[in-house]
Amino acid sequence: MKKLTVYYLLATLLMAFGLSSCEIIESGLEPRHPEDKHFNLSGFDKLEMGDGFQVEVKQSANYRIFVKGDRRDIDDLVVRVSGGQLKMYFSKWRTKRYRMEVEIEMPDLKETDFSGAVNAYVRGFNNLDQLYIDLSGASKATFVTQAKGYDIDLSGASDLTIEGNGKNLEAEISGASKLYAFDTDIEKANLDVSGASSAKVTVSNNLRVSASGASKVRYRGNPVVSSNTSGSSHVEKD
């Protein structure tokens, strides 16, 4: 009886493991039932979205929101504006999601919050005062913009590329995230880099760096550099 009990317990555990291993989230697949939809919303200058969306944002005199994906996913999609922020997310959880492409046009941009493996391309916004960029959860984004100031927060193995010009750049980079800004001319930069993260910047006047946890900062230009490093981190001229 003891042997039978042991065998029964082992079989139960194996079955439980097998069932749990089947609960794998699949995303980014080509839609089985392709569909598209326009959303008639306006009055926003901030963006918040996740769920692995493929996002393209560009400046325009008018507002436009257009999505392409699988019919079931579009039925689950919530798109709303609250406090000047366009929010986009799925209303329910599913183990399988298909590729969702999002196109957004808007006159002005102040803030973006992308999470959950979003892949974004943002272009055409010039003469911005301050642009806040938050990427988390293995998200990736490229910004071709011009702003007087950039306020950047990267975490959870996220990657950001920025191209353009700006006076000031403040960035907090953690959790194996990467900032590539060699193609952006910055006057002053303040970087806090940790957790095996990296940053590449072009700075003309002043560069302040705090780097820890095997992080790396490379810079171009001839700024006055002030650095505080620990844990095999380093700051060096490219």
Image: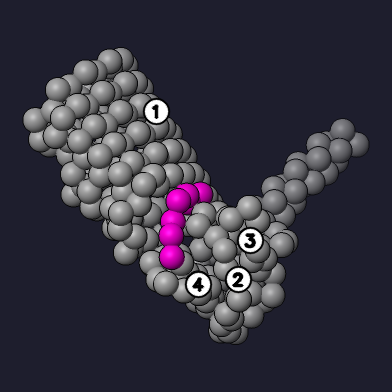
Mark 1 crowdedness (10 Å alpha carbons): few <14, some 14-19, many ≥20:
many
Q: Residue 63: which disc?
A: 4
Sequence-wise, the earlier of marks 3 and 4 is: 4
Marks 3 and 1 sit apart, C-alpha to C-alpha, by 35 Å
Sequence-wise, the earlier of marks 1 and 2 is: 2
Mark 3 crowdedness (10 Å alpha carbons): few <14, some 14-19, many ≥20:
some
Q: Is residue 36 visible?
A: yes
On the image, which quarter does residue 67 sit in?
bottom right
Marks 3 and 4 sit apart, C-alpha to C-alpha, by 12 Å
| Residue type highlighted by circle 4 | Tyr
Residue 224, position as x, y percentages in the image: 14, 22
The magenta region covers: 107-113
Answer yes or no: do the residues labelled 1 and 2 have beta carbons within 8 Å? no
Please tell me whether mark 4 sits on a helix, a strand or a loop: loop
Please tell me whether mark 3 sits on a helix, a strand or a loop: strand
Q: Residue 160: which disc?
A: none
* Residue at numbered disc 3: 81
